[in-house]
Amino acid sequence: MNIILRTRLSRNQRRIERRLDKTKLPPVDRPVFSASNIHYEISDRIHGIGYGGIGAFHLLARRIGLIDAIDLKLHLLKIHMPYHESDHVLNFAYNALCNGDCLQDIELRRNDINFLDALGAQRIPDPTTAGDFCRRFDVADINTLQDIYDDVRIGVWRQQPSRFFDRAVLDADGSMVPTDAEHKQGIGIDYKGVWGYHPLLITLANTGEVMRLVNRPGNRPSHEGAAEALDTACGTCFRAGFRQVLLRGDTDFSQTKHLDGWNDDGRISFIFGFDAKANLVDIAELLPENAWQTLHRRQRPEPKTEPRKRTPNCKDPIVREHEFTTLRLQAEEIAEFPYRPTACRTEYRMVVIRKNISKEKGEHRLLDEIRYFFYITNEWTPAAADIVLAPHGANGRCHQENLIQQMKSGVHALHAPVDTLTSNWAFMVMTCLGWNLKAWAALMLPETGRWSEKYRAEKAWLLGIEFKTFVNTMIAIPCQIVKQARRIIYRVLAYNPYQPIFFRLLEALRC
């Protein structure tokens, strides 16, 4: 970052620190929000946008070769009048990056002359044209687009340090996309009576990227197509240089007919939940008592400040007063034994957790119930507790639930605005690009030099934040747009404490 930018950012930081100084409070005789004589005018000479960070992410898409790769390999338009395939794909991603939550929000960008100038565009596709573009896709075209993403992400990954390639952790899960529409082709009804689609997501836990997305009718099981999608994602990871791959999933993904193939590879390990079938419960019950060990969950870290007084539990008195039936965990124990599923040639390690749960009604304890939870894995070295509790263990996969929620309510990718299964699949894949651009931006941040530890923490922060926080800190930056002979200048008009990261990203993209 050059000295002028660093000086201005430091000056802005000092200004806000002076305003937030607790020793210099404003007058207390009137409210802090004291503005009253407010007027609005339309500027004639100065033009700007509220989402000034979008230029940096367009620069990112160009820098990593995404735009050229889409136009070179994805062929859906016979002629370009005037839009190319990359224009349409980025239109969906940029709509998500600018807080758009439906196709109609594209119309806001289309009618914003400053937004068009910021991206060097005379016009962008309208919502109807965007929907028509989704309908041009078939399954092969969608897979081609996802293959393009894979080629681009490999180029981004190759800029990472060697430790990045120690092991890739791939998570698999499905999620319902409900819809009340009656004319959407390919919808189905799930076991809960919800109509809609049931997309499968394969995500990389290391970075949060969506590696593969497969749309299916709502009545299809979670594991359908998962083995093929996981194999494709594994191939991408190995092509990039990862030395090991760990596959994780819940009980729906313990597809026993595929376990031997993954195990024979030697580079692939897996941890899957396993249904508590009668034969497994019998084996667990016949284990000697000395085979069981108490399972110790990780304790919360000690607070760095003075401990606060714990607030009273408001729910428990109501449960007891109304004598609601409730389950309370009393103890957890863990054990293991070798097990060969019927469809497998090889014995695998079966880790089992025994939970002692008391069933209570009001103040009365009715009975104790024992429940078993099973996990199958081909990892024999880690302790049994680590198979479940380690960051890369079975419980670590729960973070994928947060990621899927980001796809639904943050990026708004898991929606069905078009009329067929394939067109909605294309919409999901193109909109998810907004989330992947966030991850690729974080990975483009250098972490070497004098402040390497600080830079590494900033990269981890950008990878881990929610999409709303990402948009508010890295995209929603008010900027004046100045067009010169061969340059488009974004003149930043406001300050936030994360702008040093933003400008470091810009510097990395220009190198």
Image (cartoon, rainbow, N blue to C red):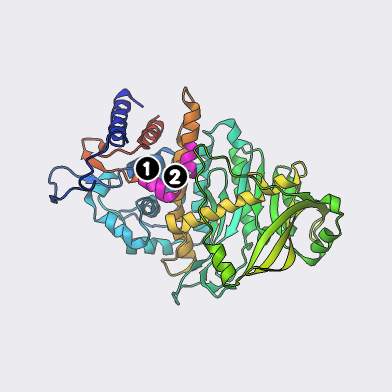
Tell me the SS state at disc 2. Answer: helix
Residue 54 placement (x, y as % from top left): 34, 45
Taking the image as shown, residue 467 lies to the left or right of residue 224, namely left
Q: Residue at x 33, y 42 (%)?
A: 55
Q: Nearer the viewer, residue 469 or 315?
A: 315
Compared to residue 47, the image places residue 342 above or below, namely: below
Taking the image as shown, residue 162 lies to the left or right of residue 415, namely right
Category of crowding for the residue at label 1, using alpha-carbon neighbours closer than 10 angstroms: few (below 14), some (14–19), many (at least 20): many
Residue 257 placement (x, y as % from top left): 74, 59
Residue labelled with disc 2: 438
Residue 254 placement (x, y as % from top left): 70, 58
Earlier sequence position, callout 1 versus callout 2: 2
- Is residue 464 shown in magenta? yes
Q: Which residues are magenta?
A: 459-472
Between tags 1 and 2, which lies in front? 1
Residue 408 placement (x, y as % from top left): 46, 59
Q: Nearer the viewer, residue 59 or 462?
A: 462
Q: Nearer the viewer, residue 358 or 460?
A: 358
**Proximity of marks 1 and 2: CB atoms separated by less than 8 Å:** yes
Q: Which mark is residue 474?
A: 1
Tell me the SS state at disc 1. Answer: helix
Query: Which amino acid, mark 1?
Result: Met
- Is residue 198 shown in magenta? no
Query: Which amino acid, mark 2?
Result: Lys
Q: Is residue 210 visible?
A: yes
Locate the N terminus by quadrant.
top left
